Structures are given as structure tokens and as C-alpha cells.
Image (cartoon, rainbow, N blue to C red):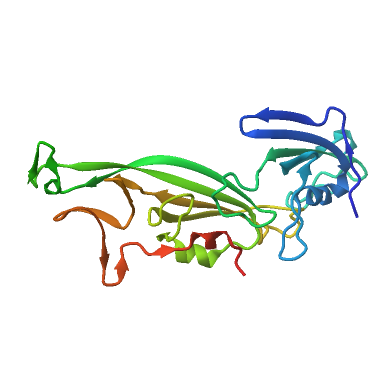
Amino acid sequence: MPVTFRELAGSPEETYTLEGFRARRTFLVPWEERHAFAAEILGSGGDHGGRPWSRYPGKESVFAVAIRFSPADPEALRTLTEESPDVQEVLAEYSGSFAQAIVEYTTITPEEREDTPSPPLQTHLSYRMEYGLMERPLLASGFFAEDDPQTPLAAELPLTHIIPYTDHYLVWQQVINPPWQAIRELQGTVNEEVFLNATPGTLLFLGATTNKLFRGSFDEGVSPFCWEIRYHFRELAIKHGGTVYGWNHLHRDQPAGYVAIADPEGPLYDSGDFSRLFLPEV
């Protein structure tokens, strides 16, 4: 049964920022129905019958992300009859009065790049990136001075290659069944196909950070079914001689140049299908 509510005067408050549209709405709801109201606004999870969080009216990509309750009339507090109530069992009692509910809305787009995997319905995929630098020592004897191409440089000459890399972060929200097995199997592998527009073999999956998301009234404790997953990929794209080399390549001096390395078991890094990271586990 829907909760009875009324939006108060002065609501909503709307803000346009560089990070998107944000809003705050203030409602009046019966005190006893505040948890049911939270469930209606934040949605519910589960394999069957789950309902997504609520949108802001007229904004397809703006969702309710938090609710704060407080007594609308603090003077309505009923006096407790127990002399020493248990702080773990008893709350201040406002039966028959109302709660003020402040609902926060923010912009959350289904996906922020066109070249990312399409997230399943009712989930959201955001993207961030950073850069870094790494040093790789090289054998100087694999190089020569331009004015004397026939003479290799002295092997003891210190030579270091400063290589920029790019860290890619994909944050997948509202995930019902995280792909735990795929995360375990793909960690430490490189992309076998183009992924995030990165050349095969240049993107290393470092791992995932996961956090549980609370939804609904929380009466049954921590939600076991709704997660936020933060994937971390590191792109190493070495540009040399008009070609892009990745994690399975090293530079050698004889014959000079970048070459893919392997042992009898295979290349230094196995490759994998990163699209599996965005398929809910069955």
C-alpha cells in the first residue's frame, strides 16, 4: 500500500553544477511509515521482483540516492514510562505524529562512454581516468647515435625509458549478482580484444573494489544483493617506430627492437574477455 505523503512548501531545491543536476525535496510522512517511504524512494533489490530507485520528475538520469528523517514536531515526543530504558532497544517515541523526510537526488547516467560495455538494465556505469609514469631500464647496446648508426652504444651507458600509463576506472552501480568468478579469473590478464578503445594486449585488469549498497527499509539488515563494483584497468601503450606495444613486449638489443616475450607455457600475461566483467553471475 503506498505511503501517504505531502511535499512541503519551499521544496524542491534544484542546483545545476559541472557534475550535473542535483536536487533536494522535503516531504512530510507519518512517523510509523517512514521506513516504508524509504523503500518506495530507494527501491528494492532481489533476483525477482526488484524495483529500481526513483527518478526525479522530468529528469530521466536523476535518481534519489539518500534520505534523511527527523521528527517534524519535536514537541510530540511521548514520555517514556520506564525508569531506565535500554538504549539498544528503545527510540524516542513520536507515534501519531509526522517525520520530515529530506530526499537527495543526483545525476547518474547509465553509461558515460560509448565504447564501454552496455550495463544491464537498471544498473549504471561511470568512468574516470588518471595518468602515471613508470621507468623501464633498457640496454643501451640496442640503440645507436643518429650520426653513427653502425656503432651500438656502450652497454654500460645508463639508459632509462620513461613510459606514461593510463589508469581506467569503471564504476558499476546497482549490481544484483556480481560476476565474482569472472573477476577472479580475469584479474592479472590483458585484453584479448579492443576494450575502452585500447589495443589488444595493452590493458591489464588489476582488480576490483566492491561495496554493498543499502536499499529499501533495511529491516532485514545489510542487503546481500546490491553492490557497487569499481574496476581498475591499467593501459600500457608503448609507441615506438609507428607501432603500439603492450604488457607482453620488452626491448632487446640483439636484434634491436621491441618483441613479444613468452615461455613454453605462453606469454607473460594471459589474455581474457573483459566483457565478462559486466555480466551478472548466473
Q: Quadrant of residue 7?
A: top right
The percent position of residue 210, horizontal first and vertical second, equals: 55, 55
Q: Please state if 244 lies on the left or on the right of 192 as rendered.
A: left
Q: Is residue 157 above or below residue 46?
A: above
The percent position of residue 21, horizontal first and vertical second, equals: 69, 33
Pick whichever, 84 or 224, lies toward us: 224
Pick whichever, 31 or 12, lies toward us: 12
Which residue ends up furthest to the right in the rendered image? 96
Q: Please state if 202 lies on the left or on the right of 43 as rendered.
A: left
Can residue 81 be seen here? The reply is no
Pick whichever, 271 or 71, lies toward us: 271
Residue at position x 57%, y 47% from top?
A: 114
Q: Is residue 281 above or below residue 198?
A: below
Pick whichever, 254 or 266, lies toward us: 254
On the rendered image, what quadrant is the N terminus found in?
Answer: bottom right
The percent position of residue 220, horizontal first and vertical second, equals: 74, 60
Q: Quadrant of residue 15?
A: top right
Q: Please state if 61 lies on the left or on the right of 249 as rendered.
A: right
On the rendered image, what quadrant is the C terminus found in?
Answer: bottom right
Q: Please state if 139 lies on the left or on the right of 231 as rendered.
A: left
Residue at position x 72%, y 59% from top?
A: 45
Q: How many marks?
A: 0
The percent position of residue 55, horizontal first and vertical second, equals: 76, 44
Can residue 129 be seen here? The reply is yes
